Image (tube, rainbow, N blue to C red):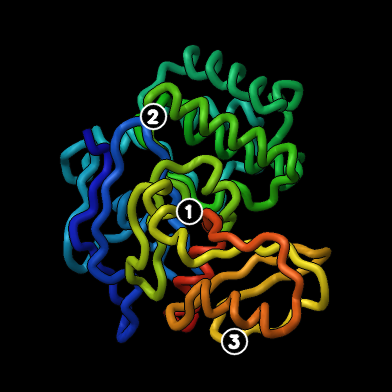
Amino acid sequence: MNVVETHGISKIYGRNIIVDNLSLSLEQGQIMGLIGPNGAGKTTTLRMMMDIIKPDSGKVLILGEQMNADAQNHIGYLPEERGLYRKQKIIDSLVYLASLKGMNPSVARAKALELLEKVGLSAHAEKKIEQLSHGMGQLVQLVSAILHDPVLMIIDEPFNGLDPVNVQLVKNLMLELRSKNKSLILSTHRMNEVEEMCDRVCMLNKGQQVLYGNLVDIKNRYRSNTLEVDYEGEFPPLDKVLDAKAASGKAHIILNGNTTAQNVLVQLVNSGLIIHRFEIATPTLNDIFISIAGKKNV
């Protein structure tokens, strides 16, 4: 079952098309990464999914229906602009927010303490929000988004402001939620996290969907665009490539649409480089992003 679907949604402000005819879907028990450069339309897309702003055309379905009060109670939302009651104690704030989703306060309190323990903040439960570091506040906000056991979580930039330890903690928590058949949509610029966690990817550029689908299928589709080379000598400049990084006898090359692996090999051989290994590699998501962004002149 699809927990969320968008059908041709668009949003226009003045003469600026922020999101242009976007269609996507996510099944239960999957994680989707919504990626793209700054200003691509990611946050606007999430806000339309949440019914915070209305699309100018198209529609959003949550659990097969347009947004209503019942659907709202099945969603956990972590917005880009974090908002907690800074003068309130952590535990009191969490219980209050859960009660807005219909949770019994005593049940919410027990669940909140359990989740705070999971993110390493149980000792801080009685502290006021204003006493927390930015990273701790981020974790509390995430707890508030999942406390009421939503079917779908919509999360905007979940890793902002977190140190590597807490990034891993959040990733583990999200993967645990997926293992419980929950669905997540996360907007992020961190390609490594998307690659490690996500089943599906949607890339936006200037409001348009430029990449969409199963992550494994996407990586196989772009496999011919990436080369790895082991070499001796001074690595030469290359024509007609989007990116080439060479150091310590190893090179990683991303081709553009106007050249081939054979053409690059000829350039390397003609330069006098000694080549020990030359092969087409499975690209990283960052490689694919560079390839698409290069073609779109981002």
Q: CA distance from mark 1 to mark 2?
A: 17 Å
Q: Residue at label 1?
A: 187
Q: Residue at label 3?
A: 239
Sequence-first tag of 3 and 1: 1
Q: Residues within 10 Å of mark 3 (few under 14, many from 20)?
A: few
Image marks 3 and 2: residues in contact by CB distance under 8 Å: no
- Residue 165 location, x and y as percent? 74, 37
User: Mark 3: which amino acid?
Assistant: Asp
- Residue 295 location, x and y as percent? 44, 79
Sequence-first tag of 3 and 2: 2
Q: CA distance from mark 3 to mark 1?
A: 34 Å
Mark 3 vs mark 2: in front: 3
Frontmost residue, 291 versus 70: 291
Which residue is rendered at x = 52% and y = 48% of the image?
194
Q: Residues within 10 Å of mark 1 (few under 14, many from 20)?
A: many
Q: CA distance from mark 3 to mark 2?
A: 46 Å
Which residue is rendered at x = 42% and y = 22% of the image?
180
User: Mark 1: which amino acid?
Assistant: Ser
Residue 80 makes an appearance in the image: no
Which residue is rendered at x = 17% and y = 66% of the image?
57
- Residue 259 location, x and y as percent? 48, 80
- Say whether residue 182 is left or right of residue 55: right
Q: Residues within 10 Å of mark 2 (few under 14, many from 20)?
A: many
Q: Residue at label 2?
A: 182
Sequence-first tag of 1 and 2: 2
User: Mark 2: which amino acid?
Assistant: Lys
Q: Where does the N terminus fall, quadrant-wise?
A: top left
Residue 86 makes an appearance in the image: yes
Which residue is rendered at x = 18% and y = 56% of the image?
7
